[in-house]
Image (cartoon, rainbow, N blue to C red):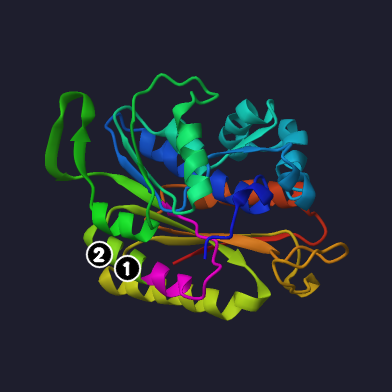
Amino acid sequence: MLSYLHEYHAGNHADILKHFVLTYILQYLSKKEEPFSFFDTHAGSGLYDLLDNRCIKTGEAENGIVKLMNSADDLPQSLKSYTDLIKLYYNYKRYPGSPEIERILLSDESVLNLAELHPEEYENLCRNIKESPFSKRTKKINIQLHHRNGYEMLNALTPPKRVIPSKEIISSRIQRGGVLIDPSYEESSEFDNIVKTICEVHKKWSNGIIILWYPLLQLKETQIENMLLQLVTNVKKKNSNTEIIDLRLCINSKESHKETSLSEKMVNNPPRLYGSGMFVINYPWKLDDNAESALSSIVNVLSPKEGSFSVKKY
């Protein structure tokens, strides 16, 4: 099923969590001058218009990134890299999706693989990637677009080998890097696909940073918790020293939400997504400390009464 379009949800609280973590990890990887590989399995269109009727209709950006940017001057240092990047787009009433953030932050001669299966979203992604990023960056990276299943792409292309496009050199050495997996979770099979893919990729690319976004929904609570438990168990079984972190941001309590179908128009009901999480294998140094500071501030801005966050390490 390919019904999900992120245009309705761009700039919401889940995007804030996802892109704060993504920004931190990419900047960590870019500290070394050598290139790295990064994969995005569900890329979307890459760039979103905050004045689009679909975005305005849900009000999610208004209650998310708009609130946060209105308080940008009062936010802690831990959020500065993220808000500075967002500001480049927000000033033009745009919001950058993960592919846009990735192509800005990857270091010179790095390789970025973007997969998107939805025909309309893939067409938009191709068009947006052709345009110069708002940051006007001068770094040269190799961007590969894939109109295919993101899990298949990931399994086929990992572990990545060191590639220097300008010199046409391919090394046998496994490349540093990471992957972002953030599906829509529309299908029940998504959970099994995630566990299978992550376990296979981690087995052959043990030093890769694997980033999984997941929703917090009452109707799927058991499936989500089982998925995370399977991932922790499998990763730790391979190497008990592998570091894992689970970050959660909630804008409401679980009990405050009335579950409805995606097609039902909600006027007085709270949104179905009361929060979301980021599960990271091989998380970088000090992500935990920065997340504590950043998520606390995000909660205070977006939902000081009912919001909450958690940082759990394995």
Q: Residues within 10 Å of mark 1 (few under 14, many from 20)?
A: some
- Whether residue 167 is visible, yes or no, is yes
Query: For the magenta stretch, what is the residue range?
Result: 180-195
- Residue located beneath label 1 in the image: 199
Residue 141 place in picture, x, y as percent: 34, 29
What residue is rendered at 75% in x and 39% in y?
A: 66
Residue 31 place in picture, x, y as percent: 37, 33
In the image, residue 32 sits, relative to residue 268, either above or below, namely: above
Q: Closer to the camera, 246 or 5?
A: 5
What residue is rendered at 65% in x and 77% in y?
A: 219
SS of the residue at dot 2?
helix
Residue 230 place in picture, x, y as percent: 41, 76
- Whether residue 61 is visible, yes or no, is no
Task: Check disc 1 and give the amino acid type.
Answer: Cys
Mark identifier at residue 203: 2
Q: Report if residue 172 lies within the magenta region.
A: no
In the image, residue 80 sits, relative to residue 228, either above or below, namely: above
